[in-house]
Image (cartoon, rainbow, N blue to C red):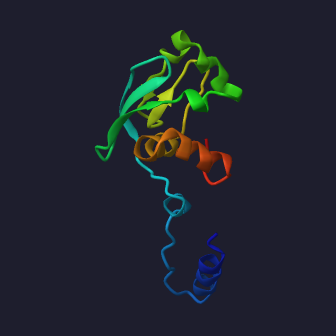
């Protein structure tokens, strides 16, 4: 992804020169790096989220609960146990399931299906 920039920075570093800034990959893939600052369960699979930059909205995560550690969240009573972890900047559940804050931010801004497509195409971390 950043091969040319990394090679140039390697050359600059070896020459003792100032390195060039390289933007995070997340920005290239349309992901965002904000943290969740408020979270409330609003439905069987829905969350109301507020992010550190003020963006907010409700998302239905049901489409994302189809595998692995997320399967127990299909039980609405278990889903309701999701809590904001201020240190992690995201919502976590008792089984240690969580969604990356950038996934949730992308889901609020662009929709859960778009966020899932980025994850499942290998361009983001779930």
Name the residue: 49% across, 53% down. Answer: 31
Taking depth in this image into account, of 35 and 48 the one nearest to the observer is 48
Q: Is residue 17 above or below residue 81?
A: below
Q: What percent of the width, then of the height, locates residue 54?
A: 28, 43
Q: What percent of the width, then of the height, locates residue 6?
A: 62, 76
Q: How many marks?
A: 0
Q: Residue furthest bottom?
A: 15
Would residue 59 appear left or right of 116 to someone viewing this image?
A: left
Q: Quadrant of residue 83?
A: top left
Q: Residue furthest right?
A: 68
**Quarter of the rendering occupied by the C terminus:** top right
Q: What percent of the width, then of the height, locates residue 39?
A: 38, 28
Would residue 66 appear left or right of 106 to someone viewing this image?
A: right
Work out whether residue 50 can be spotted. Answer: no
Name the residue: 58% across, 86% down. Answer: 12
Q: Is residue 19 above or below residue 81?
A: below
**Quarter of the rendering occupied by the N terminus:** bottom right
Q: What percent of the width, then of the height, locates residue 80?
A: 47, 15
Q: Is residue 53 above or below residue 66?
A: below
Q: Quadrant of residue 9?
A: bottom right
Name the residue: 49% across, 46% down. Answer: 102
Work out whether residue 93 can be spotted. Answer: yes
């Amino acid at each position: 992804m950043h091969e040319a920039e990394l090679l140039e920075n390697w050359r600059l570093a070896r020459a003792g020169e100032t390195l060039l800034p390289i933007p995070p990959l997340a920005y290239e893939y349309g992901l965002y790096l904000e943290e969740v600052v408020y979270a409330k369960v609003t439905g069987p699979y829905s969350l109301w989220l507020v992010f550190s930059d003020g963006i907010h909205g409700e998302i239905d995560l049901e489409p994302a609960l189809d595998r692995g550690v997320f399967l127990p969240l299909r039980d609405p009573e278990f889903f309701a146990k999701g809590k904001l972890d201020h240190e992690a900047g995201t919502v976590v559940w008792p089984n240690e399931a969580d969604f990356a804050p950038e996934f949730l931010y992308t889901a609020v801004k662009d929709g859960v299906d778009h966020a899932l497509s980025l994850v499942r195409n290998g361009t983001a971390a779930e």
